[in-house]
Amino acid sequence: MHRRRFLGRVGVASVGVGTVGSVAGCLADDYDVAMTADGFVPDELTVSAGGTVVWENTSTRVHTVTAYEGGIPDQADYFASGGYEDEETAREEWHRDFGGKLENGERYAHTFEVPGRYDYVCIPHESGGMYATVFVDE
Ligand SMILES: [Cu+2]
């Protein structure tokens, strides 16, 4: 399990300079969702509004984190690795030059402000079922 609570990370940030070494050790696996060879783990995650989710590619395959534009709350900001502002652009850039790719060990983070359900996908592995959901509580 690599899930960690948002409040837990605030606690880490307040730790003194003298323990930087051990903090760095903790941060090595301080992510919420792993991108394995064939999926997002966990494929369902719940956070509180204002919480940040960190994805890390723990596999040797290249992945993306790409929100389904029709699968997020109306008022929510669109999100995608590569920073694209809409799903169409994210898909075009992936097909053009692997835009938005996350290689082994690379991370993507997004802060969820609006409560609701967020469905997202890995563009190159969509047909393989690599999609998942973040639920944001009030
Ligand atoms: Cu993938």
Image (spheres, helix red, strand yellow):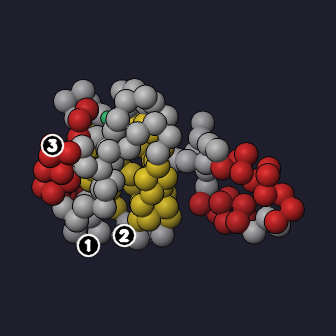
What residue do we see at 28% from left, 40% from top?
A: 122
Residue name at image x 40 percent, y 70 percent: 113
Instruction: Identify residue type, mark 1.
Output: Gln
Q: What number of labels is visible?
A: 3
Q: Which mark is residue 75?
A: 1
Residue 31: where, in percent of width, then height?
55, 47
**Mark 3 vs mark 2: in front:** 3
Residue drawn at x 40%, y 39% is: 103
Q: Quadrant of the N terminus?
A: top right
Question: Which of pointers 2 and 1 lies earlier in the amino acid sequence?
Answer: 1
Q: Is residue 94 left or right of residue 130?
A: left
Is disc 3 placed on a helix, strand or loop? helix
Q: Is residue 41 visible?
A: no
- Under circle 2, the secondary element is loop
Label number found at residue 114: 2
The residue at the point 79 percent across, 52 percent down is: 21
Residues at discs 2 and 1 in contact (Cβ within 8 Å) = yes
Label 1 environment density (alpha carbons within 10 Å; few <14, some 14–19, many ≥20):
few
Q: Quadrant of ligand 1?
A: top left
Q: Is residue 10 visible?
A: yes
Q: Earlier in the sequence, mark 3 or mark 2?
A: 3
* Residue 1: mark in rendering: none
Disc 1 is placed on an element classified as loop
Q: Position of residue 107 (x, y in %)?
A: 47, 49
| Residue 95's disc number | 3
Q: What type is the residue that disc 2 sits on?
A: Val
Nearer to us of marks 3 and 1 is 3
Can you say which quadrant of the picture contains the C terminus? bottom left
